[in-house]
Amino acid sequence: EYGLEKPQGYSVSFHYNPHVEYHHFGSSHPMKPWRLTLTKELVLAYGLEYTMDLYEPRPASFEELAVFHDREYLSFLSKVTPQNAKPDDPCYLAFGFGGESNDCPVFDGLWNYVSLYSGASLNAASNLLNKQSDIAINWSGGLHHAKKNVASGFCYVNDIVLAIQALLTQNQRVLYIDIDVHHGDGVEAAFASTDRVFTLSYHKFGIDRHGYPFFPGTGNINEMGPTDPANRGKGHSLNIPIDDGIDDDQYKWLFKTVTNAVIEKYNPTAIVLQSGADSLGGDRLGRFNLNIKAHGFCIEMVKSYGRPLLLIGGGGYTPRNVARTWCHETAVCVGAELHDVLPAHIPYIQAFQGEENGGGILYPDLHNTKRHDNLNSGEKLHKLVQEALENLRYLEG
Ligand code: TV1
Ligand code: CA
Ligand code: ZN
């Protein structure tokens, strides 16, 4: 009924442990694991579960997380609770918890939460490694800011780094692409010294009218990894800094032109795509004006290369639109087209109703939901693409 044929015949797997949904960062915190409940319910309502292999992964173990993270950091993370936390403890701030912004609060079940989303990314990576799947999806992962011994920007454990490390056991070159509105700094830093991972991030970059940089403040066009010629990682990062209000056609052109060039020059044997939904129009923290289908175009384009693909979530702070986008992108992976009118029997249907525009439908117009004037002129974008392509010269011989 919903057109669920799979003409391209990709084998797609969906890796999700529902226990991840029940964790809360705190009522005012923008990160809502509950958006994963909404995503799952939409995916089920459209019948997409019949087009994929479903996995309920076990949580990752301490030892699995220690492949990237420091043991002292993990030990602290595994023991800290809201009851025993000492915000004055030097460890606490040094490891990135609390602080003035409280981006990374200590909440009940924190260790369980990080083990669950990391376990799902590792399970997805192993499906690609043993060729059970062509595309493996984990919408609960994509926490790209976490460092080996510091929590940062809502991210405590870097499931992306762990999954890439697993893929490197059988892949000579892994390409990491990040369309979250924030710079994928943690993944870039983790693989700074190797030429076996190329990191490509598209993000908002700039300083606001109060003088604050958009988080995390890194990722300008001239940041291409290490500058020391003796370092193998030199030139193996590409950052695409974008200004407020970019629209569908501009973003699609930018993404297509730059990503094509990177894939053709780097020739990866596997691709990891972080699909943060905070680059949509109307996002609570984002600044772009993208519609769902423009965001999904990026997934479609990467999929068309037919390389093993790990598709993971990330940011996304307007839950109903996160769910819409990730449901659409799940359909893109299996090659299905979805009705714009939402199926009638969705639990939590209220979440998708009563909106000024878009009530009861899958593809509302998000371009004007939260006006961000478009500060990206055609001229600026052409210059950006030119510089980006020049930055790829390190990939030649
Ligand atoms: C608690 C309660 C924490 C309300 C954090 C928005 C909150 C933010 C909150 C918030 C918020 C950020 C900074 C400031 C650096 C700090 C998952 C100088 C309404 C991948 C992480 C953004 C994005 C961090 C994560 C950022 C991801 N923005 N309300 N915090 N200090 N932090 O700017 O890339 O999407 O906003
Ligand atoms: Ca990004
Ligand atoms: Zn983000």
Image (cartoon, helix red, strand yellow):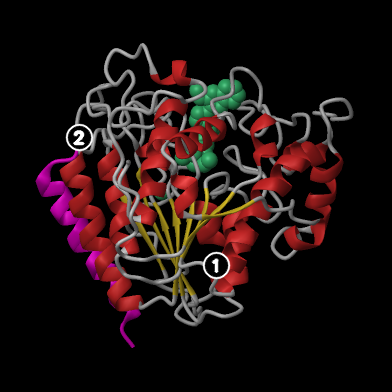
Left or right, residue 397 beside residue 346: left
- Per the image, label 2 sits on a secondary structure element best described as loop
Distance from disc 2 to disc 1, alpha carbons, whole Å, reads 32 Å
Seen from the viewer's position, the closer of residues 240 and 339 is: 339
Give the position of the C terminus as an image quadrant. Answer: bottom left
Which numbered marker is on residue 191?
1
Image x and y of residue 365, in percent: 23, 27
Seen from the viewer's position, the closer of residues 46 and 173 is: 46
Q: Which residue is mark 2?
A: 375
Left or right, residue 265 beside residue 310: left
The residue at 36%/11% (across/down) is 354
The residue at 67%/27% (across/down) is 24
Seen from the viewer's position, the closer of residues 87 and 144 is: 144
Instruction: Tell me if residue 381 is in the magenta stretch.
Output: yes
Give the position of the N terminus as an image quadrant. Answer: top left
Beta carbon at label 2 within 8 Å of ligand 2 = no
Which residue lies most toward the bottom here? 397
The part of the image, by quadrant, that contains residue 20 is top right
Image x and y of residue 109, in percent: 78, 34
- The residue range painted magenta reads 375-397
Task: Please say if 268 is above or below 87.
Answer: below
